[in-house]
Amino acid sequence: MGASVMSALGGSVIVAVAAASGAAGVALLLLSEELRWMRTGATRPDLCGVRIAGAALVIRADDRERAVDIALPAAFALGGAGAFYAVCSGELDLSFVQHSPRPVSPFTFLAVAVTGAVGLVWEMVRRRPDPLVLTPHALIVGKRLGPRGAIAWTDLDRTEPMPTDVGRRRRGADAWLAIGADEEPRLRCNVARLGAPTTFWLLDFYRRHPELRDELGDARVLRRLRDGSLVDDGRADV
């Protein structure tokens, strides 16, 4: 009897863990979208994502999203594996949905577990985005942000917000960088924790004000970020 009780308790724990992991996965998915929206639509800069280093402004990617990107597939892998085991061991009864128009197979949970495990491995080996570095002479674009390498300010002819299909508040999620007569590359602004609008304003402001670019190497640029003086010439609606 003791063995059966322990088995029942073990099965209940597995079902509970599977359910909790699945719920956590859904919550993390919503959190990921919320973080992305916050960076894309926020008009107040998050200065936790910037620092002055080596006479340059370093704009880091959002570490919170990196953590969510790792936890999300882990939750689905654990939840899917637990649900698959619970169904196969008889602890989770799916008979009430087997006669529905879309019956649930135990292998659906196995597929979720495998997909989550593959996603977890991918996120663990994938490099985090390199920072965007602004110096008085150039902007250095990191991996996964856009055209990788150094772009001299003098080569940057135009910066324009790239329209998206998710509403006017998110127009600055990406930006076009016009470099001479070459094809206009795209820069992802919504990866930075600083926020997409502020990242765009930084690029646009210092492109149009070469006489102020020496501010990028010291605390003056941080003061501009705090007081909002980066926004001028009718750019406040970006």
Image: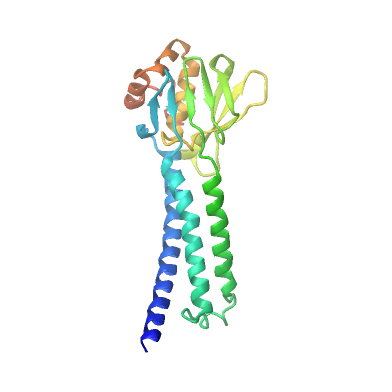
Say above or below: 72 vs 174: below
Where residue 200 sits: x, y (%)? Answer: 48, 28
Q: Residue at x 57, y 56 (%)?
A: 118
Where residue 120 sits: x, y (%)? Answer: 52, 53
Say above or below: 30 vs 110: above
Q: Is residue 235 visible?
A: no
Say above or below: 214 vs 85: above
Quadrant of the image occupied by residue 100: bottom right
Q: Residue at x 42, y 30 (%)?
A: 198
Taking the view exactly as shown, the residue that stands out farthest to the right is 182
Q: Residue at x 55, y 52 (%)?
A: 121
Residue 30 located left or right of residue 108 = left
Where residue 40 sits: x, y (%)? Answer: 45, 39
The color scheme shown is rainbow
Say above or below: 149 vs 152: below
Quadrant of the image occupied by residue 141: top right
Which of 220 and 74 lies nearest the eye of the viewer?
A: 74
Residue 159 located left or right of residue 1 = right
Split into 4 quadrants, where in the image is the N terminus? bottom left
Taking the view exactly as shown, the residue that stands out farthest to the top is 211
